[in-house]
Image (cartoon, grey):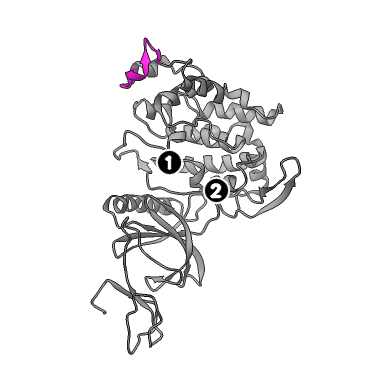
Amino acid sequence: HSDDNSFMFRSFTPPLKVTVCVSGQQSNCGVRAWAVKDDEEGHLIYRTGDVLQDRYEIVGTLGEGTFGKVVECVDHRRGGCHIALKIIKNVEKYKEAARLEINVLEKINQKDPENKNLCVQMLDWFDYHGHMCISFELLALSTFDFMKENHYLPYSISQVRHMAYQICLAVKFLHDNRLTHTDLKPENILFVNSDYTVTYNTEKKRDERCVLNTAVRLVDFGSATFDHEHHSTIVSTRHYRAPEVILELGWSQPCDVWSIGCILFEFYRGYTLFQTHDNREHLAMMERVHGPVPSRMIRKTRKQKYFYRGRLDWDESTSAGRYVRENCRPLRRYVMCETEEHHLFFDLLEGLLEYEPDRRLSLSAALRHPFFSPVRDAEHFSGARDISR
């Protein structure tokens, strides 16, 4: 079937005789082959042991999303090392998004060939029977999945500090290169190694995990946008969405900074700061946590339906009003310990979660914040810029 692109072979030596076995049975010449098929959603149908491009042997599935699936593979051209392969659905809009992501990843590789800026490294990409495929260094659990598997137990303040510093470094690198990530969330921050120790909590009668190494990498550049490119009206996953995006005032790099503030709060407390799916309620939560939306933003927004006489149109006596009142409080009232480092953390959060984008803390200023002094001192002492290795 050498002329037929719908077949591939799991062999590097040319067979004398090939019997195609779509069922996946071993043929009488020891070579297995099958038709490349998609399911009804456009996902590639594969099995453990399948080899793509005479190179990538699938070991198992790592995850799945609207875009497609991520599988772990042995890369036979890289000495048998394990990599992550993102297999995009054979659907045009996802393929186009993958092409845009590849463009961003190529720019990142070009600007940071030594992979010092903590963004996941793309190793290779190819089109496999209509599926865009991107191979990456293999990472471990996301910071979200680790928390989820750990009863949503928050990270310690020192762990939050180290992860926060790395996230600010990685995103600052994007901003310096005129990029906005636009989809920062704990699911898109992955541990390099998520091994952990276990202690038993006698009070709660459960095992609790503590990650051993807080080195992280930033992933998923599928929505990353260059300054000169078209800016979609709505960006970011709901809980991490900045007020200027909700109010459709236009956005740029500061919307990432707001997302980082929401992420760091979640690391610190173990739950999301703004747990909602509705714009008006989201704004009401922001007001409960940060005070009133600035009048300048209210005057400029096209979303006047959320406001009445220059104030948020929100009834606190409704069930939604009670929900917000019971589930949100002023930011400083979330402090878990009255020590200086905890208060410094909240001082940093206030800068990251400033309503007005042009008044929000820049990431270069954030990295100079006193909260990060212990990390900067360790970095200076070790003489290495990449503190995560």
Q: Tell me residue 51's x, y (percent).
A: 41, 72
Secondary structure beneath dot 2 equals: helix
Determine the residue located farthest toward the front in the rendered image.
319
Per the image, is 160 magenta?
A: no
- Whether label 1 touches label 2, CB < 8 Å: no
In percent of width and height, residue 228 lies at 30, 39
Distance between the alpha carbons at the discs numbered 1 and 2: 17 Å
Count of labels in the image = 2
- The single residue placed furthest to the top in the displayed view is 309
User: Residue 278 appears in which quarter of the rendering?
Assistant: top left
Is 31 located above or below residue 288 in the figure? Answer: below
Query: Could you tell me residue 73's position as x and y percent?
Result: 47, 66
| Vertical relation: 66 (above or below) 243 | below
Q: Amino acid at mark 2?
A: Asp
Residue found at x 30% / y 21%: 302
Q: Secondary structure at mark 1?
A: loop
Query: Which mark sits nearer the N-terminus, 1 or 2?
Result: 2
State whether residue 356 appears in this view.
no
- Specify the amino acid type for callout 1: Asp
**Quadrant location of the N terminus?**
bottom left
Q: Residue furthest left?
A: 3
Name the residue: 52% across, 30% down.
352
Instruction: Using the rendered image of the protein, determine whether residue 180 is visible from the camera's viewpoint.
Output: yes
- Segment colored magenta: 300-313
Query: Badge 1 is on which residue?
Result: 183
> Which residue in the protein does label 2 denote?
145
